[in-house]
Amino acid sequence: MGKFLIRSALVFLAVVTGLSGVASAVDASADAVLRVGLYYDSNALPGANLENSVGSGYRLGYYEEDLSFHELGRTSETQISMVKTQNVTLSDGNYVDGTGTVTVGCYHLQLPGTYASFQEALDTAETLSDGFPAWIDGSYYVRSGAYTTKEEAEAGKAALGLNDAEVVGTSGYAVSVVVTKTGEVLFQFDGGSALSLGVCPGLDDSVKTVTWFKGYRYYGGFQYVRDNGGNIEVINVVSLDDYVRGVLPYEMSNDWPLEALKAQAVCARTYAVTNTSGHRDFDVCASTHCQMYQGLNLSNERTDQAVDETAGEFVRYDGEPAITFYSASDGGATEDVRNIWNANADLPHLKGVVDPYEADVADGISQYHWSYTFTSSELTSKMNSSLSGKGYSFTGITDVYVSEYSETGNPASVTFVDRSGKTWSFGPETIRIALGLRSNRFDVTGGSGGAGYAVNDGSETLSSINGAYAVNGDGSITAISGTPYVITSSGTEQLSAPTASASSSAGSGSFTFAGSGYGHNVGMSQQGARAMALRGMDYIDILTFYFSDVEIW
């Protein structure tokens, strides 16, 4: 999606009910540590490779509940891979299910008894062909070989003369550490459902390590979570500010003004500790569902400076870290969060503001002004496709109009009328997603056409009786038929009756949604932050403009 965020917020504020709008997921402290999901769910891997970039070797063990690392063993290898303890093969440098050039099997020969330490187990393992230490449910064992079947393992047992060895496998939670591009097992870990393998790059903490994974360089360590029998989820365990270093250049161009980058750094840091997206095994994911995070590849001196000069700072409302949404550009005004995602959420710091700054850079923003035109049948199809699962069914949309505007001039409610005269009203975010619009700042033209007659507060028009209803004295509602009249300042005028095509088809008109900006319009505009910085404003000016009644500390 590029460098500028349009974050999905379908699960927005599920746990936020208080007036402060604060929902802390991670302690907001200078030494906070995050778990960042890199590969998970349907993208979980049979095997995951690591390579040292800065530092050498790896410590092997697990992460405690407080994310401190508990070492069980170590290796001086610079390229290692973590593979699930099922039969996996090497194909094009990656470990996969199926066929390949090298196989890592899931059956092993285990010597009798347990060992007091990793070193003791390693010393014994090195006396065996293909021997390796294993940590299984709290005890060290020595195992040999990686066979694909029990029969192969039994044959290996006889060939090696290990008559007292036992053919064993592991549980569906286990992970083996192998030398990359080989079947050589270095270590095996099985902590059951309670503990997952952790890998801490570097043999000590004298060097700040950087590690390659899937073409990206990362600070911190890694956790490998395997559901029973499934593939491996890869999680980066990293300090909060090092996480922000890996977010900043993917959410804002690394050559933008420093003060804009600092505003983005504080936003990203604050969002990370208040995120409530509900991931099971980690705090935030690496996609735009949370924040885009791809390590250090695009980091430079400017982005690192922005992180360093704001270290430990958060956007705070009522003294606590606030929820800091942001999007690419607001088109001229941001919007109250309650008008976008949750009508019941009272978040005083997420109020809409008219933005006079973004216009400074609008001419240089691709598709800043945009429009989409839909025929009646196209609009009907899109709305049914998006909303039929939520119980809505449209039988031919004949009119669409903005039925309510917010205080900042954005649509607060959009009303649709179908050929049966039925009406529905939706908030702008529903429409943006259903129709693929670029932002929540737009107007609608087309439909029944004509100047129409003002109704209610003058913000709505009525040009025909299509979809019009009368409220009777007893409170009942009746569709208007025939050829009624309206009273205007110049007298009475007759409204047009519905045509045959309007009552029997989806309609032949078209509707244009025209707007400006890109994103959900809540919180900070990234392009607006750039414009403010170009005017000489600092990051505190930027953040306190877009977030109401907040402090930065």
Image: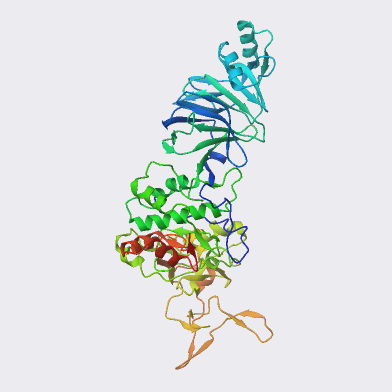
> Of residues 357 and 259, which is closer to you in this image?
259
In the image: residue 534, left or right of residue 381: left
Say whether residue 18 is visible.
yes
Instruction: Name the quadrant containing residue 468.
Output: bottom right
Residue at left offset 67%, top offset 36%: 194
Its colouring scheme is rainbow
Residue 505 position in % (x across, y down)? 52, 67
> Of residues 236 and 469, which is closer to you in this image?
236
Instruction: Name the quadrant containing residue 35.
Output: top right
> Of residues 490 and 301, which is closer to you in this image?
301
Q: Residue furthest front?
A: 206
Residue 37 position in % (x across, y down)? 53, 42
| Total numbered circles | 0
Looking at the image, is 194 positioned above or below residue 393?
above
Residue 264 position in % (x across, y down)? 42, 55
Looking at the image, is 420 positioned above or below residue 130?
below
Instruction: Name the quadrant containing residue 544.
Output: bottom left
Say whether residue 330 is visible.
no
Looking at the image, is 90 positioned above or below residue 490?
above
Residue at left offset 63%, top offset 35%: 227
Residue 193 position in % (x across, y down)? 67, 35
Looking at the image, is 34 positioned above or below residue 233?
below
Q: Residue furthest left?
A: 363
